[in-house]
Image (cartoon, helix red, strand yellow):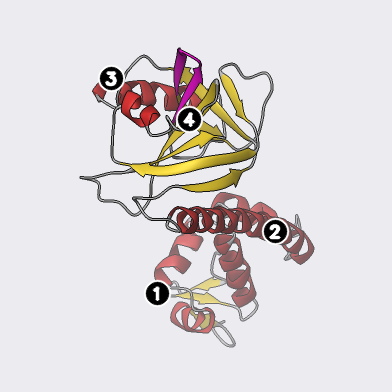
Amino acid sequence: MKNNLLTIGELAKRTGCSIKALRYYDSIGLLPPTYIDPDSHYRYYTVEQARMVELIQICINLSIPLKEVKELILTKDQTLNYKQLIEYGKQMTEEKIAALQENLNVLNNLQQEIDRINSYRDDESKVFTFNETYYYTLPLEEEEMNDHFYKRLETMFNECFHQNLSIKPDYSVIIQQNNEHVKKFVACEIYQHDSPLPNLIKVNKGPFLCKKTDCFQFREICKLFSEIEADTKTIIISPGYNYSLSSPYFEVKCTL
């Protein structure tokens, strides 16, 4: 009976799958041995079962739950369903590639943003043109970034998650000045515009004068742009990059 059969150790060496994993596959009915010695209780497998192990490992690499593997790769007559596995595997792989590409795009955009901010010194100003941007916002009464401000910020993030918004992890403060009238908002940028959303502020594409500051007081930040003689201004305050947590700085942008 044991002729032409593989011991569990031989199967492990041939497939690169651990003996512990092979025993587990047996325990859940996924890969029972062809023969178990009644005296030694050693497990024996056919050479063909090595292919089953290979398919199981492919499923694991695709993050397919083991409880679904048996239905996916075995037909009703217990033959290997390569076609179904290949189709499902291609679908899963394409979804993973798309997710990885999205992550790569986020990293590239982040690198571009860091390079942009680092392109001018802390003691100078620079004009940049930014694309149209949408922010999810909540009204803000605080005059500086204090404990109350950060509690308001936490509330805003919780509301974003409740709304299932795809948001960027950084926060911003938007200050809208119309002559002597000033409105402040705690804000986070959203990736897509969803028109039914309340509390949405659109910032149009255009040039902004950008500066850096370590000031936490909004009135003082607004004074940084006193030379801009315009009845209406939009100022956006965002955390900078490459800073010490004990001494953060902010980039501030003002519409021109």
What amino acid is found at the position of numbered circle 1 in the picture?
Answer: Asp
Q: Which residue is mark 3?
A: 148
Q: Quadrant of residue 98?
A: bottom right
Residue at the right extreme, as displayed:
83
**First in residue order: circle 4 vs circle 3:** 3
Q: Quadrant of residue 118?
A: bottom left
Q: Residue at x 57, y 87 (%)?
A: 3
Q: Residue at x 53, y 25 (%)?
A: 233
Q: Observer-nearest residue: 230 or 118?
A: 230
- Horizontal relation, residue 81 to residue 256: left or right: right
Q: Which residue is mark 2?
A: 94
Number of residues whose C-alpha sits closer than 10 Å to that of mark 1, classed few (under 14), some (14–19) or many (20 or more) = few
Task: Give the spatial CA distance, label 4 vs label 3.
Answer: 21 Å
Residue 113 pos. (x, y %): 50, 52
Q: Which residue is mark 1?
A: 39
Residue interval drawn in magenta:
173-185
Q: Is residue 224 above or below residue 4?
A: above
Q: Secondary structure at mark 3?
A: helix
Task: Give the spatial CA distance, label 1 vs label 3.
Answer: 73 Å
Q: Which residue is mark 4?
A: 235
**First in residue order: circle 4 vs circle 1:** 1
* Circle nearer the viewer, 2 or 3: 3
